[in-house]
Image: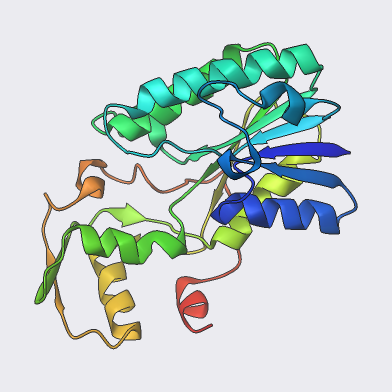
């Protein structure tokens, strides 16, 4: 099976390409570094020529009000090119609970991306994942100084990027879901407690202060960022991942 992986040189995309090729498929990475510009459509027809599946893992450069326009343009371009090329399956990666966090422009943008795919001309699958372990340090940095890290007690259910990539690869080689698969980590943490675990593992002596208004995830109500009962649960725990 020939699979075009758009955004195939990033954190998730590079792993998806490696997994698919190891499984005997022909997975080809595409990104600006390979000459593909999804915003303008440059290189799309060439990237999708002969592809059975396209996996779109591109992301907007910002999390602000510019993100909806990015996803609208890139999805419109991708689906038009996929239709011209006769691609039989389009896969995207989205976020668990995105529709439950309307106060965040980026989450609204991901819901928009999903809706465009659902209404498009190509059979599709949506993989929704929870937050990645690899991004926890960045989350802490948003609301930190030399003495403290301020975090809300928002429940989160993070997972390893490698297991996100595995979920995407598995969906890509299967029949189109024409629906959504949720994947999540094996444990739910309050974000402030996850911060304390992370700092302790790094030998960082700063204090974590619980602040219900701190950072992007303060906008997530209740358990919006946890996966619920129907998710595929990954195996790797956060402490196991930290210990590697």
Query: Depth check: 21 or 125 in front?
Result: 21
Total tally of numbered discs in the picture: 0
Residue 142 falls in image quadrant: bottom left
Q: Quadrant of the N terminus?
A: top right
- What residue is shown at x 58% (from left), y 52% (from top)? 12
Query: Depth check: 233 or 137 in front?
Result: 137
Residue 39 as seen in the image, left or right of residue 44? left
Residue 196 as seen in the image, left or right of residue 235? left
Residue 62 as seen in the image, left or right of residue 118? left
Residue 105 falls in image quadrant: top left
Q: Position of residue 165 (x, y in %)?
A: 64, 53
Q: Compared to 158, does 28 lie above or below? A: above
Q: Position of residue 58 (x, y in %)?
A: 53, 38
- What residue is shown at x 65% (from left), y 42% (from top)? 34
- What residue is shown at x 72% (from left), y 19% (from top)? 82
Q: Position of residue 160 (x, y in %)?
A: 53, 63
Q: Quadrant of the C terminus?
A: bottom right
């Amino acid at each position: 099976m020939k699979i075009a992986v758009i955004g195939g040189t990033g954190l998730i995309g590079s792993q998806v390409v490696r997994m698919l090729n190891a499984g005997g498929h022909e997975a080809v990475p595409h990104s600006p570094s390979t000459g593909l510009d999804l915003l303008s459509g440059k290189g799309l027809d060439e990237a999708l020529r002969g592809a059975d599946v396209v996996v779109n893992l591109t992301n907007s450069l910002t999390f602000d009000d510019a993100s909806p326009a990015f996803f609208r343009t890139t999805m419109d371009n991708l689906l038009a090119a996929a239709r011209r090329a006769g691609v039989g399956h389009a896969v995207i990666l989205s976020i668990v609970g995105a529709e439950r966090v309307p106060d965040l422009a980026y989450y609204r943008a991901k819901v928009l991306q999903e809706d465009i795919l659902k209404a498009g001309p190509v059979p599709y699958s949506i993989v929704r994942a929870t937050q990645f372990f690899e991004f926890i340090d960045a989350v802490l940095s948003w609301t930190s100084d030399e003495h403290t890290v301020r975090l809300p007690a928002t429940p989160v259910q993070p997972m390893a990027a490698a297991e996100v990539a595995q979920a995407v690869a598995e969906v890509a080689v299967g029949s189109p879901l024409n629906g959504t698969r949720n994947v999540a980590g094996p444990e739910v943490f309050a974000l402030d407690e996850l911060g304390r675990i992370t700092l302790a593992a790094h030998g960082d002596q700063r204090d974590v202060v619980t602040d219900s208004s701190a950072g992007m995830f303060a906008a997530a109500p209740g358990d919006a960022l946890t996966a619920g009962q129907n998710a595929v649960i990954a195996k790797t725990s956060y402490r196991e991942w930290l210990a590697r």
